Amino acid sequence: MSKIMTVNNHPLVRGWYDALLSNEHMQGTGTMEKVDKDTGITERCCLGVLCRVAMAMGLELKTTNTNCGTGFGHEANAGLLPHEVALALFGEYDAEELYDEHRDPYLKPFEDAILETSASDLNDNEDFTFEMIAAAIKRTWPEAFTE
């Protein structure tokens, strides 16, 4: 059974795609967003970029600095896509079905991929660049790019 969900917010998908290709975000791993204490450079995983895009598009999302990085939304979990962003992306969803890692969007990593992979796994464990993740987003939801 596919873990890929239908997205209801095509502008948010396109904004996420564009932001990943923009070179405006330094890619990081292990947390949504963190600031290097020595350099002051902010690094984001692909989901941290999605949160920032949603905020730029008007989603009110609280940010909380934690020891692990920046947490987003009412949960303030630096490693989990906030419920508010999942709602903005997918619309209503079954919270039990999409709890924790399942709230992480699953993507088609390659054209002929049999299995889907979570966006955070591509970012943190599979060494996918933002450009590769953007391509996976476009492969997963091509309907968002036909309008």
Image (tube, grey):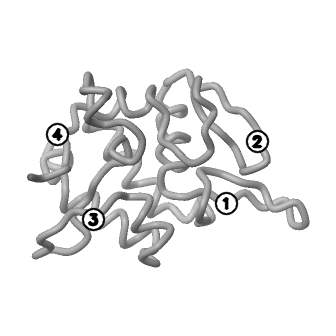
Q: Nearer the viewer, residue 134 or 31?
A: 31
Viewer-nearest of labels 2 and 4?
2
Chain-order first, disc 2 or disc 4: 4
Chain-order first, disc 1 or disc 4: 4
Distance from label 3 to label 4 (Cα)? Answer: 15 Å
Distance from label 2 to label 4 (Cα)? Answer: 32 Å
Secondary structure state at the residue bearing disc 2:
strand
Residue 128: name its quadrant.
Answer: bottom left
Q: Nearer the viewer, residue 79 or 137?
A: 79
Q: Are marks 3 and 4 in contact (CB under 8 Å)?
A: no
Q: Which residue is mark 3?
A: 136
Chain-order first, disc 2 or disc 1: 1
Crowd rating for badge 3 (residues with CA inside 10 Å; few <14, some 14–19, many 20+): many
Crowd rating for badge 4 (residues with CA inside 10 Å; few <14, some 14–19, many 20+): few
Looking at the picture, which amino acid does disc 4 mark? Answer: Thr
Q: Which residue is mark 4?
A: 6
Q: Which residue is mark 1?
A: 43
**Residue drawn where x is 46% and y is 78% of the image:** 127
Looking at the picture, which amino acid does disc 3 mark? Answer: Ala
x and y percent of residue 8 in the render? 22, 31
Looking at the picture, which amino acid does disc 1 mark? Answer: Glu
Looking at the picture, which amino acid does disc 2 mark? Answer: Thr
Chain-order first, disc 1 or disc 3: 1
The C terminus sits in image quarter: top left
Q: Are marks 1 and 3 in contact (CB under 8 Å)?
A: no
Distance from label 1 to label 3 (Cα)? Answer: 21 Å
Distance from label 2 to label 1 (Cα)? Answer: 15 Å
Q: Which residue is mark 2?
A: 66
Crowd rating for badge 1 (residues with CA inside 10 Å; few <14, some 14–19, many 20+): many
Secondary structure state at the residue bearing disc 1:
strand
Secondary structure state at the residue bearing disc 4:
loop
